[in-house]
Amino acid sequence: MSNFSFPEFDDLPVVKGQPKGCLWGFFDVNGQKDQLGTLRLLTKEVVQKAKDEIQIGTHVQLDWPLHNIQFPGFGRIPLQHTVKDLADQGFVAFDDVISFNTQTSSQWDSLKHFGSQKTAVYYNGWTHDQLKTSNDLGIHKICDRGGIVGRGILVDWLSWWEHENPGIEPPSAISCHKIPVSELEATLAYQGTETGQGDILIVRSGFVRWHNNAKADIRALGTEKQHYMIGLENNDETVRWLYSKHFSAVAGDTMGFEAWPYPEDCCLHEWLLVQWGTPIGELWDLEALAEECKAHNRWSFFLTSAPLRVVGGCASPPNAIAIL
């Protein structure tokens, strides 16, 4: 199947206990509860078409160094990296020992990462208690399907904003600045970028650039001591816009993709991960990609991503490469 046929948002069937717009059951196959969500939009036909994005052979890895975030919040630990000399084993060689929280640098959130905060239910009806002792919805499900491969589109909101507001400092990356749909659309129009079903949406808001340039004390203030983050606006318009585009996955350079903290009545993490089964990429390093896209006046590319095959994992570095 090259394209899925989706009902309009308001015509989606009601799922008991869930808000209007829930996609549970839509991707179920032969009576088996789906665990891939919108990644099923990456059909063979979609992937074959995406190869046409490879035009010049330039490739950019989108993973930030694992030691960033330097000062993680929410009780998370920074990277711990030990190099082990194997001389005592009779070899001229080294091994690595690495320990890190998968939320503290570039990552994909698996569908196991975040549930409905009010009902403790995850994508397609799994409960929090079930997932405590189950590998369901884990990051390995992405690996089992062959990773994430398709057409990526960069919505370089930061470059658009600076073009529209010359000489003015952009909104702070460590504020709850809300990027509205109107500005996403304006950025797409400015770039001349069109979207298609199954595309992987990637938004550059300026968080990684801020962190790269900030001094240590400001980094600590912005990421550990307070939790305000730039991102997409949490409201019904954004939810409906994302649904109408039928992206296979979304990602960005900020800590939460959406503006944080989110309001009580709308959380994009819940809509994307819980209601639709859409993986969220966070803290991706988009700086070099933005420069390449600008240089070639093209913001679409072939994207490949191979998460770590951790059975039951909640998240993973994306190991993502954009090929133009």
Image: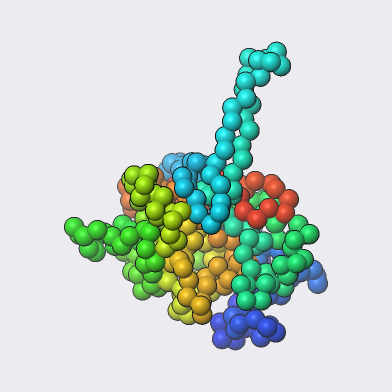
Q: Is residue 184 above or below residue 150?
A: below
Describe residue 286's horizontal placement relative to residue 89 as left or right: left
Identify the image quadrant of residue 213.
top left
Residue drawn at the location 78% of the way across and 59% of the way down? 134
Residue 51 in the image: state x and y as whole percent.
53, 51
Residue 22 in the image: state x and y as whole percent.
63, 78
- Residue 82 seen in the current view: yes
Residue drawn at the location 48% of the way across and 71% of the way down? 262
**Residue 35 vs residue 145, the one in the foreground:** 35
Q: Residue furthest left?
A: 167
**Residue 237 vs residue 263, the one in the foreground:** 263
Residue 189 in the image: state x and y as whole percent.
34, 67
Residue drawn at the location 73% of the way across and 70% of the way down? 127
Residue drawn at the location 43% of the way across and 41% of the way down? 58
Q: Residue furthest right?
A: 31
Describe residue 173's horizontal placement relative to residue 7 as left or right: left
Residue 6 in the image: state x and y as whole percent.
60, 77
Q: Is residue 108 above or below residue 178?
A: above
**Residue 134 vs residue 150, the one in the foreground:** 134
- Residue 302 seen in the current view: no
Q: Is residue 309 above or below residue 226?
A: above
Describe residue 200's horizontal placement relative to residue 186 as left or right: right
The mark tally for this picture is 0
Q: Quadrant of the N terminus?
A: bottom right
